[in-house]
Amino acid sequence: LTHSGKKKAQKRARKAAWLAKHGDEKSEKVEAVESKKAKKRPREEKNEPHEKKTKKSKKNKFKQNNEDGDQTNTGAAAPVVPQSSSPSTSSLLLSNAAGLGRRFAQRLQGSRFRWLNETLYSSTGEESKKLFEDDPSLMQAYHEGFTAQRAKWPKDPLLDVIHWLKKEVPSQMVIGDFGCGEARIAAALPKRKIHSFDLIKVNERVTPCNLAEVPLKDESLDVVVFCLALMGTDWLKFVQEAHRCLRPNGLVYIVEVESRFENVERVVKSIRGLGFEIVHDKHKGFFVELRFQKVGKGKGGPLRLGAGNGSSSSGLGACTYRKR
């Protein structure tokens, strides 16, 4: 044998001798290692599911879920599903959206109300009546806008009118509520005889008509109320119609926003010319209260609203609301 061959033979002999001497010990060690491995078996062998998720397994699982959930889209690329927002973020977004929606609706309502308000003050009673008859929804829109504006006033003037009627007007007297809106006076005084008039019928208490031509006989009322109701270029015709309907010494109670009065004395003079005398004049800062008593027959013919008799020339201008 060569030198290298001898060395290999010697190495194999030493290995065989070592195995003959230590073979049993190695077997014991191997068994001990195997026993330890058995104790550390994966949890899935002990019926405790636990899978180490890798990028590959996640991808395969996602693909499998898409295949199981949408069989109609086989062959198409699976869409990437974004993670949903947390509950607090979602509720915040919904709250902000709802707030924006409410503000937009309020602005739209306010804009429509301003347009209606300007139209009523620049039209005659007959023109306004036709406007609401052509589109009855406008009256509901007007009342909603008016209610929103009323909430911003320092007080509701109609409550003072109702208080005065309860305290100062005998229960047997007949009342005419001209430009009644929702007929709140009739609702507040259900045992009184009250005729409620407005351009359109919003409830069963209201009689629709032009305030210059109410369906009543001459001298059939004791009191007529105009609470924020002298709207239109021919408002003096409304007062003249009240004069026709009132009995001798009957009363007219007028409440208007102070900003409408370009000249209070001119307004009083215009109404006195129809056959009334002023018996009460009160300024409350935001509203003006005027009460007149019928003292004569008034002007029997048609009232001409030319120079000196129109809305503005009679001292009573339009009531305008600013954009907010």
Image (cartoon, rainbow, N blue to C red):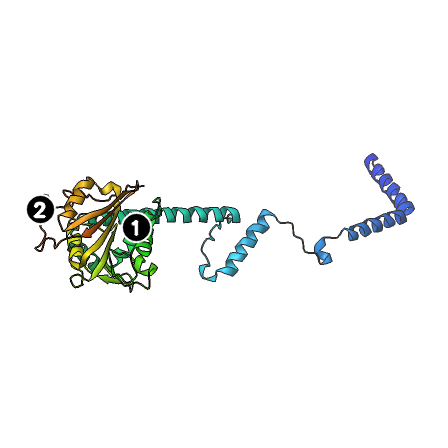
Q: Quadrant of the C terminus?
A: top left
Q: Nearer the viewer, residue 59 or 113?
A: 113
In the rendered structure, the answer to whether residue 151 lies left or right of residue 33 reads left
Give the residue type that dot 2 points to.
Answer: Gly
Estimate the spatial distance between the alpha carbons at disc 1 and disc 2, rounded to whole Å. Answer: 30 Å
Residue 86: percent from left, percent from top = 53, 47
Residue 86 visible at all = no
Residue 174: percent from left, percent from top = 25, 61
Give the residue type that dot 1 points to.
Answer: Phe
Q: Nearer the viewer, residue 258 or 103?
A: 258
User: Contact, CB < 8 Å: mark 1 with mark 2?
Assistant: no
The residue drawn where x is 84% and y is 49% is 32
In the rendered structure, the answer to whether residue 286 lies left or right of residue 212 reads right
Q: Quadrant of the N terminus?
A: top right
In the rendered structure, the answer to whether residue 113 lies left or right of residue 267 reads right
Q: Name the element at disc 2.
A: loop
Q: Name the element at disc 1.
A: helix
Residue 94 visible at all = yes
Q: Which mark is residue 306?
A: 2
Which mark sits nearer the N-terminus, 1 or 2? Answer: 1
Rendered view: 167 above or below 152: below
Circle 1 residue: 146
Residue 190: percent from left, percent from top = 33, 63
The residue drawn where x is 81% and y is 36% is 4
Q: Nearer the viewer, residue 320 or 7?
A: 320
The residue drawn where x is 35% and y is 46% is 155
